[in-house]
Image: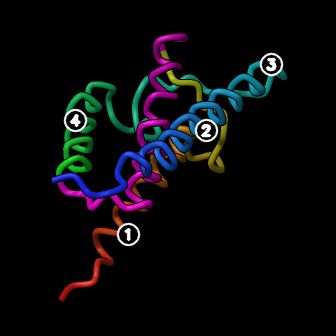
Amino acid sequence: MRQKGEPNLFFKIFTPTFLLTIILDQGAKFISLSFGFYTEKNQALVLGFLPPDFAYLVLPFLFLSFALFSQKSNFDYFSFGLFLGGGVANLIDRTRFGYILDNLPFFSFFWFNLADLFIFLSICILAQKFFLKKRV
């Protein structure tokens, strides 16, 4: 059952968020490489902790959960745009370089990039919505 106004939310919220996420991440990586900032090569996923094959299991599950269970509010489209934009930005790196370029250090524990940050924020938004949902 489609809700009224769904295509408008897709083009007004999801599409700009998705494109801006990719542009910001790739722009930050371009600046890092152009000015010779220190970067790390990441062969794994999720801040270097999970193997790349894990994405083949998680990404379809997250896509299906959005498609089937979300109420398709502004925050749903925004968070899904962040999530897919971050995933596509990292996929661009993996196809271009053979690895994901991390250019932001978190103290000395691990390195990440803007795409990782956008993915993390999208999961936080969806988790907040899920766990803090008003129950009747």
Q: Name the residue under label 1.
A: 128
Q: Distance between the residues labelled 2 and 3?
A: 20 Å
Secondary structure type for disc 4: helix
The numbered mark at residue 34 is: 3
Sequence order check, earlier mark of 3 and 1: 3
Sequence order check, earlier mark of 4 and 2: 2
- For disc 1, the neighbor class at 10 Å (few under 14, some 14 to 19, many from 20) is few
Q: How far apart are marks 4 and 2 (CA)?
A: 23 Å
Q: Mark 4 points at which residue?
A: 60
Q: Which mark's residue is nearer the viewer, 3 or 1?
A: 1
Q: Which mark's residue is nearer the viewer, 4 or 3?
A: 4
Q: Which mark's residue is nearer the viewer, 2 or 1?
A: 2
Q: Which mark's residue is nearer the viewer, 4 or 2?
A: 2
Chain part drawn in magenta: 69-98
- For disc 4, the neighbor class at 10 Å (few under 14, some 14 to 19, many from 20) is few
Residues under numbered marks 3 and 1 in contact, where contact means CB atoms less than 8 Å apart = no
Q: Quadrant of residue 135?
A: bottom left
Q: What residue type is labelled 2?
A: Leu
